Image (cartoon, grey):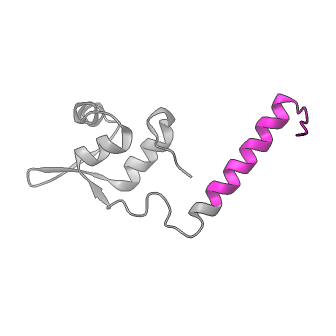
Amino acid sequence: MSEFTIVPVEEFRALLSTIVREELQSHFRDSKAPFDAIPDLLSRHQVAELFHVTVATIDNWANSGHLTKHRIGSVVRFEKEEVLTFLKSHQKYQRELM
C-alpha cells in the first residue's frame, strides 16, 4: 500500500519550485544562454516574435520611443541589448527564460 504525507501548501510550492529550478538549470547548464544565438541587430519581425506581438505593435513601441529603431538604408533594425532590456522590463511579453 502507498504511503502519503500531508505537506502544507506553501512548503509544497517551495519544494516544487526548487525541484523545477534545479532541473531547468541542469538542462541549460551545458547549453548556450537563451539569447546568445540572437543576432546583434533584429528585424521588426524578429522583435515581434520575441514579444509574441504583431509587427504593428513593434512599430507603435518604436514610434512612442519605447524601442529605438535604426535605419540602414531602407531597412529598420533594433539593437539586441536594447530589445532584451525592454523585454526583461515587460515580463508579460517575456518568453520562458532562465
Instruction: Count the marks.
Output: 0
Which is more toward the observer, 41 or 19?
A: 19
Q: Position of residue 31 (x, y in %)?
A: 52, 67
**Residue appearing at x 52%, y 49% in the figure:** 97
**Would residue 65 be counted in the magenta stretch?**
no
Q: Is residue 92 left or right of residue 1?
A: left
Give the vertical position of 31 relative to 88 (above or below): below
Q: Is residue 34 left or right of residue 14?
A: left
**Residue appearing at x 57%, y 52% in the figure:** 98
The secondary structure that dominates the magenta segment is: helix
Task: Please tell me in which quadrant of the rendered image residue 26 appears.
Answer: bottom right
Task: Please tell me in which quadrant of the rendered image residue 36 appears.
Answer: bottom left
**Would residue 10 be counted in the magenta stretch?**
yes
Going by the picture, which residue comes out furthest to the bottom?
30
- Give the residues drawn in magenta, as a range: 1-25
Give the vertical position of 23 relative to 96 (above or below): below
Q: Is residue 70 left or right of residue 7?
A: left
Q: Position of residue 93 (x, y in %)?
A: 43, 36
Q: Position of residue 88 (x, y in %)?
A: 49, 43
Q: Position of residue 58 (x, y in %)?
A: 27, 36
**Residue appearing at x 68%, y 48% in the figure:** 20
Give the position of the N terminus as an image quadrant. top right
Going by the picture, which residue comes out furthest to the front?
1
Give the vertical position of 9 relative to 26 (above or below): above
Give the vertical position of 81 relative to 86 (above or below): below
**Residue appearing at x 59%, y 61% in the figure:** 27
